[in-house]
Structures are given as C-alpha cells and as structure tokens.
Amino acid sequence: MTLPPLAFVPILKHRAWGGRLLGSYGKELPKEGLIGESWEIADLPESITDGCSQVAEGPFEGQSLRALARTHRHELLGRAAPGPDGGFPLLIKFLDARENLSVQLHPSARYAEEHPEAALKTEAWIVLAAEPGAKVYVGLHDDVDETRFREAIETGSFLDILETAEVSPGDAIFLESGLCHALGEGILVAEVQTPSDTTFRTWDWNRDDPARPLHIEPACESVRLGEAQKTRWPRITKGSDARTLATETVKTSRLIRCEFFEIDHLERSATLAPDAPLDFEQPTGGSPLVLICTGGSGVIEGAGESLELFPGRSVLIPASCDVSKIRLQVRDNEKPSLLRVRPADVLDNTLA
C-alpha cells in the first residue's frame, strides 16, 4: 500500500515564555494564554501528555501517528531508523519565544543508558523570524569546569559563562544532547529533534518560579564542558553561508547534517522570474521526508491525494510515496520556500 502525504493537527503548548506569533503561522490559538510551542509531528510515549499527533485530513483522518507506525510500519518508515521505542524518529515543532527560554541541556548517552526514563535529545533550530539584535545562547566558555558550572547555578551568574550569538532569519542552530543552550527572546523557530522530552533546566534567568524547578544533579552528570562541546556540525550556520546546489528550478541550501537528521532549505533558483512558482517533484528515495512550508502557498500531491501548503504547515511524506509534486506560489509578497527534513537512514548508518 502507498501512503499519501500526511498533515497533522497541531498540538499547542502553553508556556510561560510563549507569545501569540504562532497565530500568523496557521495555528488557531485560544483567545487567551501564551502559546510557546506547536508540536507539528510527534510520536512520543504514552507517558507524555498530548505527545502523539493525529492525522488532520484525508483517508487516515483521526488516526494517530503511533497507530500508523504500527499498522503501516514499512510504508511509513521505509529505511528510516525508528525512534528509541519504535516510533517515528523525529519530533517537529515551532517555538515562539516572547521571553528568554530557560538555559537547559539534555541527557548524555551515559546518563540515558543508566536512566531508562531519560532519552537523548539532539535538536536543531531554524530561525524563521527574529527581532533586531535577538540572541541565542549556545555552549559554555571553554574554560568552564564543573566547579564553575555549579557556582554559576548557585549564584545566579550563569549569563557570565554562556556563549551568545546574534541570529537572523535563515540561520540554523545545531544542539547536540548535553550542550547547554537557550533560545533568546524575540525569536520564532522551527525545531527538529529526536523524539524525546527529557530536559534538564540549569538556570531560569532568576525567575525563582516553583513551577519551574532546576535539575542541577542530572545536568551536572550530562553537561558537555570544554573540548567535549565540539560537535560534528557547526553550532551555528548562517543562512547566507550554507552550502548550496541549484538546478533550473530549485536552489537547495544544506543547513544541518548529523547522525539523526539532515535539514535543507528549498527556494526558487535565481534564474527564475520573481513571480515564478517553486514547482518540482520530490522523490522519497525509500525514506520518509518532512516538508515545512516557510513561505508562499500552494499544494502537494502524492498517491492520489493532495494537501494545501501554507506558512506553518508541516507535511510528512511516507517512504512509500515514491514521488510527490509540490507547487508553491508567492503569498503576501513572501517568496515560496520550504524546509526539507530527512531522518537517519538505516543503510547510511550500516555503511558508515
């Protein structure tokens, strides 16, 4: 059986640091409250509240992603390496940071191995919107050791040991599990991560909120310090510096490639007219893909079904959907553009 492209009902998450910008990315926000996250494609264990996506429309409307992974495993995943519990291997989100997020990190491989309830969480942020001067906090100064790390937590001087960088739309931030990080205020990002919700909060900007406790001991066991902070892919890739490949119709920019996923930005080739659509065919090559619409509007067609595309919509193309046709037009003066995410391929890992 060939599965068609799938869109899911966004799972909105109230967050103290959230805002209202996700309403401009196709999300129906409640009348009140701060929404920090929209989980677009999620397949987390049942222990996570509202952690599994439901198909929004089409022949599988109402079914959960977890159910599809059970009943149509090969058609959905193909050669993709499944998540730790056999589910879909990626969690796709949008984050709206009206205020600074807490400084946090995720479990090390050793910690996850010794604590079955924890899971590795390597993630990436792609900046979609940012106020002038907006910053991210990625990594610690190279000379910080565990003693200085603990001291910064206890004295509330954590900002003194953090590496900071200004970011702009199109930039990509790569965060391996164990690396200290925080998303700064005034930034909207698409987030791609491994399917985990294990987070150790190390500093919360001295908010002293009992509902947001710190996790000092797990953080000290997992934190990357000094040379251990070096990652296989740069922590920050400026959109203007990304490696590109252009055909007659599509310009592809490689933003991130790691052992868990790769992320490309797709837009029209410069040779096309300013009002030309982004029009191309997308093969899966035996592994599922996720397309995140970041500009323009149009349609994706595959396996006899079609879905509308608009900024903020994420679509999962199952491995069995050999070729999909994508057509995006200019919308509200925004050029058509997509993020394309491919999870790790079992064959690639086997031959590595």
Image (cartoon, rainbow, N blue to C red):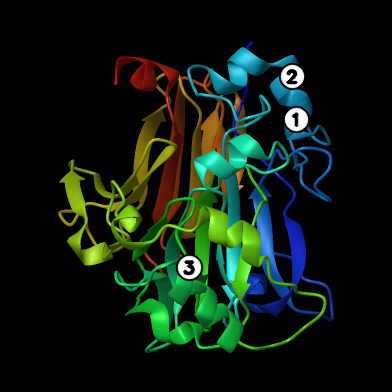
Residue 47 in the image: above or below residue 226? above
Q: CA distance from mark 3 to mark 1?
A: 30 Å
In the image, farthest residue toward the front: 147
Dot 3 alpha-carbon crowd within 10 angstroms: few under 14, some 14 to 19, many 20 or more:
many
Q: Residue at x 78, y 40 (%)?
A: 54
- Sequence-earlier tag: 3 or 1: 1
Dot 1 alpha-carbon crowd within 10 angstroms: few under 14, some 14 to 19, many 20 or more:
many
Displayed quadrant of residue 135: bottom left
Asked whether 338 or 328 is in front, the reply is 338
* Image quadrant where one finds the C terminus: top left
Q: CA distance from mark 2 to mark 1?
A: 6 Å
Q: What is the secondary structure assignment of the residue under circle 3?
A: strand
Describe residue 252's horizontal placement relative to residue 130 as left or right: left
Residue 106 screen position, x and y as percent: 56, 54
Amino acid under label 3?
His
Describe residue 106's horizontal placement relative to residue 280 as left or right: right
Residue carrying label 2: 70
Please tell me the numbered disc located at residue 181. 3
* Image quadrant where one finds the N terminus: top right
Q: Residue at x 46, y 19 (%)?
A: 322
Asked whether 302 or 312 is in front, the reply is 312
Q: Residue at x 37, y 15 (%)?
A: 350
Q: Check contact, mark 2 vs mark 1: CB within 8 A.
A: yes
Q: What is the secondary structure assignment of the residue under circle 1?
A: helix
Residue carrying label 1: 66
Describe residue 37's horizontal placement relative to residue 350 as left or right: right
Residue 231 screen position, x and y as percent: 31, 51
Residue 80 screen position, x and y as percent: 50, 23
Q: Nearer the viewer, mark 3 or mark 1?
A: 3
Residue 205 in the image: above or below residue 68? below
Residue 75 in the image: above or below residue 16? above
